[in-house]
Image (cartoon, rainbow, N blue to C red):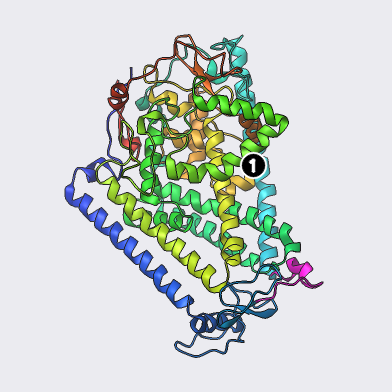
Amino acid sequence: MEIRTEVPMYGTPEAEQSPNASSRSIVANAILAVALVGACAVGAVALSQPAAAQNMWTAVATRSPVVVGARVPTTAARPPIYSAHQEPTRLSSAGAMQFGEEAKLKREEITTPKATATAESDNFFFRIPILGRYIAFFAGCFALYSWRDYRARRSFNIAMDERLMAEKGTVKLVDSAVVGLSGLKGKALIEGKTYPTKPQVMGAIPKELLKKDTFKSMMYALMSCALTGACLYAGTFIPYTWSMWWAWGIYGAVTGTVATGCWVVAHECGHNAFSDNKFLQDTVGYILHSLLLVPYFAWQRSHAVHHANTNHMETGETHVPRTGRSGNTGVSLLFKKLLGPLWPIIHTVVVLLFGWPLYLMKGESGGPAYGTTNHFWPYAPFNNGEKELFPGRHKLRVLMSDVGVLAVISGLIAWGWTYGAMYPILHYVLPYLGVNCWLVGYTWLQHTDIDIPHFDSNEYTWAKGAFHTVDRPYGPIFDFLHHGIGSTHVAHHVCSAIPHYNAWKVTEILRDTFPEHYLYDPTPCHIALWRVANNCIAVGKQSGPDGMYVWLKDPIHGADDGIDVLTPEQIASQPELCADDECKIADKV
């Protein structure tokens, strides 16, 4: 059985062994947190003053310099973000405008965009500056250019799997109780496979592919931020009317999709894959994740635990399936029976919209080892498992993460209080929900399908966890915007410190070197999502040499009564590998 060793969560092992280095990193991050909250607080206070706000917005609208301390008439053009291109009307500074309804004026009157539809506003798209259309044109050209490589890569993966399965002959599945087969065709359920050790896997990856290029990483970060900013700016041209609900829906979906690239960049920072400059890396990650209401350091710790325990039934940190004997299993089956064909739709909507906040607030989908967890408060009544998710100094880092999230929330509240709640809801909350949907959708499909097994402590090894992650075909546009996070995820779990721009080459190496273990499902992602939502309810442990937990056709009656149940003492004694710098840690077998 593989022995897993406790590895420091943050920084390199050498840095962790130095108390001075640890103190310096905490002090540096504390300074970063104070600077961010200070800047947001100053901005929120400044913009909460109508005169100061109108001075700034008028200057932007007229391309004139801002005059500090200047008094601006309340009739000056002052949009909520930047909408001098919209016709103004006088409304309450309390933000009482509600899509065309004027509320009673209870505060000092200020100017906000008019919320009435006109024939001209119906053609708002053609009023967006021509630069946006040039960007769209070149993006289309890039997509067409990339489509050939995407199709070639997909065809090669399919042909390789078909050849491998033909060589294997008839596939012997672990049990007939499984739901069925995905596009993997049961590849992950083949019994008796010999898995490589971590040194063998890492030895196949050239060292140069582990190197980080700070300039290249920053360019990708700036690209994602610029594209997100362009989408936010384009949103200011949409009229604030009920008749334009469809345009706001498209805006939320498109901007959320583009902004997910910023989330992925911060995700790379949290994995020590962005830069060798730790302060720059944490600065970028902290700011981007805070802007998306993600507690950076708290998530960094919990996500490392997830990587170290992928597909582990006890110590897995997220996407741990329920067993057939779980109480919630019966509830899900009841809803599936009552809702019929609507079940996968409603299940998908609930998971995509509420999965992320429930995970942050109560550790939803985590294994039993950590109990109920909270990414914002590492103390009671949370942190009640047999193992601590945020031990020792990680508690302080959780609180440091809260500072950034609270600063952004304060800015949103100030924005809504000054100009009306409609503005942060339309311009921020809609894209924010889009980002959450992409995040949950990616992680759900990376670790779940009807023929993806899980393992308990008796059978789990690092290789089983890393190689039971799935790559999927998201297409050139999403791969470009999201830096290939869904198409190179096996490489990411083999070594999370590999920069995303090198993950493509590493994926090819893993595919060619370990063809029996590398998993690629060619099923279109929307079909795979439907399949997972409809069928993946509960697992049961099956007989066989690998002791796999598989998704069951009949989660109640198909459950194995002989499933091993660990005692709390056994769970607490399970070794834990934190994978912050896992590429430099050798396995001990």
115 part of magenta stretch: yes
Is residue 491 shown left or right of residue 330?
A: left
302 part of magenta stretch: no
Is residue 32 shown left or right of residue 45?
A: left
Q: Quadrant of residue 251?
A: bottom right
Seen from this angle, which residue lies furthest right? 119
Kind of element beneath mark 1: helix
Observer able to see residue 578: yes
Q: Position of residue 444 (x, y in %)?
A: 54, 35
Residue to which mark 1 is pinned:
475
Seen from this angle, which residue lies furthest left? 19
Q: Which residues are magenta?
A: 113-128
Question: Vertical placement of 3 versus 233: above or below?
Answer: above
Q: Name the residue at 58% across, 70% down.
A: 420
Q: Name the residue at 59% across, 80% down.
A: 78
Quarter the N terminus occupies: top left
